[in-house]
Amino acid sequence: MAEERKHIGPIQLPLIISRISWRDLAISLGPFVLICAAAVWVAFHFVRPAPPDTIVITSGPEGSQFHRSAERYQKVLERSGINLKILPSLGALENLKRLNDPDFEVDVGFVQGGLAGGENTDELVSLGSVFYEPVAVFYRSAKPIDRLSALKGRRIAIGPEGSGARALALTLLKSNGIEPGGSTRLLPLAGEAAVQALLNRKIDAAILMGDSATPTAFRKLLHVPGMRLFDFAQADAYVRRFRFLSKIELPPGSIDLGRNVPAKPLALIAPTVELVARTGLHPALSDLLIETAREVHGRGTLLQQAGEFPAPREQEYRISDDAARYYKSGKGFVYRYLPLWLASLVDRTVVVLVPLLVLLIPAMRIVPTLYSWRIRTRIYRRYGELMALERAVLEKTTPEQRAELIRRLDDIEKSGITTKIPGSFADELYVLRQHIHFVRGRLTGGTTTAMGMVETPGAAPDSAVKSNN
């Protein structure tokens, strides 16, 4: 026996102590993981991608004010790593048609006010008005006239077909009772051709706008005897009737100080040119374009005050939400201090992280509670079975029934022992075993010690332990 005991070592028991139940943790976290995945999907679905590095602008004829402005935009945008592709056009009317054509590859364009009457502009937005295009009406007359209707029956240059100047001229003349096909001859002349025709007496009046109404053309025509610049005495009425028009007043001597031209304040009307974009323009590019417009058009001139443009004047096109936000509060924080590519990355990352944080913060409090509840539920389920057995003890039972109750009690104890419970919940499991021993004592007629052991009458404590094992 002594030799046998030499070979008997300590009993090797499999020690399986889990600090965490990964299955329960996965089930507890599962709903939140699914909700977070859905939130990320929604965020990626609605968040805009990174801004493209190329913008296409439809400008105007080469050498025109529209085209020169686009070239200045191009130089400014290069500093931010944006390539501006310039597409020449016949003018504002063609720009509007290009922007309205979904099959035409263009992002923004210069569009003069007064052209949207027959166009659907639902998919177009304005980034703001950028400068005035005054309407200058030159005419020959011994005496000044105060209404455009006085030009009825004369020869008038109104600009070529398809130009914005012609479209606006026809609108203004029609409001004064002058329409194509009547006694008035409306000629498709503009720019230098119209100026020369007026100087050579081939026409009686010319409605000049934009590149046709240059300071050089003004001086050349106003120095000719008998040539007059129409004073829009009804300017306030025009502005109220046509909301895309603005009133501009030229002070005395503003064109020629030496000769005091004009000799008295002169009223002009002018549509504003708007920077029009499609609704899908990236917000970062919207901010960048408005900032560029401010650098290009923000200086004071004869027709505008410094800082007057760009301006969010909602006329024929609604101001985009991104533009309205920019005019109200400026560029976003990250775009103000970081390069465009990095700011865009940070901006999109924040859009994804915010909903995640909104979900994860309450999850950090709910998941541990849910996890503990799942673990304790296994133990509490045994308590329910145990209470049912204890109620059965109070009733009169036969020896066979009592033996069946003891067998069921053994099953409860066995299931409690074999249940995988993390070590942090072991104290609750051992409390359950004490209660099981207490009920066992009720069934066997014994008593339960403070340590939860059963003592039967006439039996030693060791025998009670052996019977329980």
Image: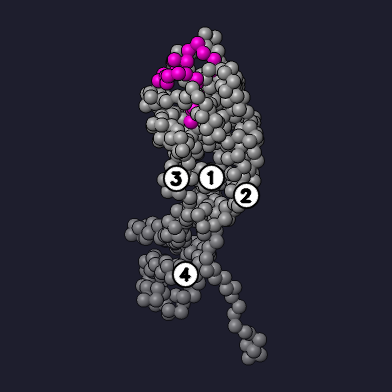
Q: Is residue 281 magenta?
A: no
Local SS, label 1: helix
Spot occupied by residue 155 in the image (x, y as percentages of width and height): 54, 15
Spot occupied by residue 78 in the image (x, y as percentages of width and height): 62, 49
Local SS, label 3: loop
Gap between marks 2 and 1 measured at Cα? 14 Å
Q: Nearer the viewer, residue 62 or 130?
A: 62
- Check contact, mark 1 vs mark 3: CB within 8 A: no
| Vertical order, 252 against 166 (above or below) | below
Residue picked out by circle 3: 307
Q: Residues in magenta? A: 134-156
Give the mark nearer the N terminus: 4 vs 2: 2
Spot occupied by residue 199 in the image (x, y as percentages of width and height): 57, 23
Quarter of the image where the N terminus is located: bottom right
Single out the mark in the foreground, 2 or 1.
1
Gap between marks 4 and 1 measured at Cα? 70 Å
- Crowding around mark 4 (Cα neighbors within 10 Å: few <14, some 14 to 19, many 20+) is few
Query: Which scheme is used to colour this image of the protein?
Result: one colour
Residue picked out by circle 2: 78
Q: Nearer the viewer, residue 445 or 263?
A: 263
- Crowding around mark 1 (Cα neighbors within 10 Å: few <14, some 14 to 19, many 20+) is some
Local SS, label 2: helix
Gap between marks 3 and 2 measured at Cα? 23 Å
Give the mark nearer the N terminus: 3 vs 2: 2
Residue picked out by circle 1: 296
The numbered dot on residue 230 is none
Residue picked out by circle 4: 424
Local SS, label 4: helix
Q: Amino acid at mark 4?
A: Ser
Q: Amino acid at mark 1?
A: Val
Single out the mark in the foreground, 3 or 4.
3
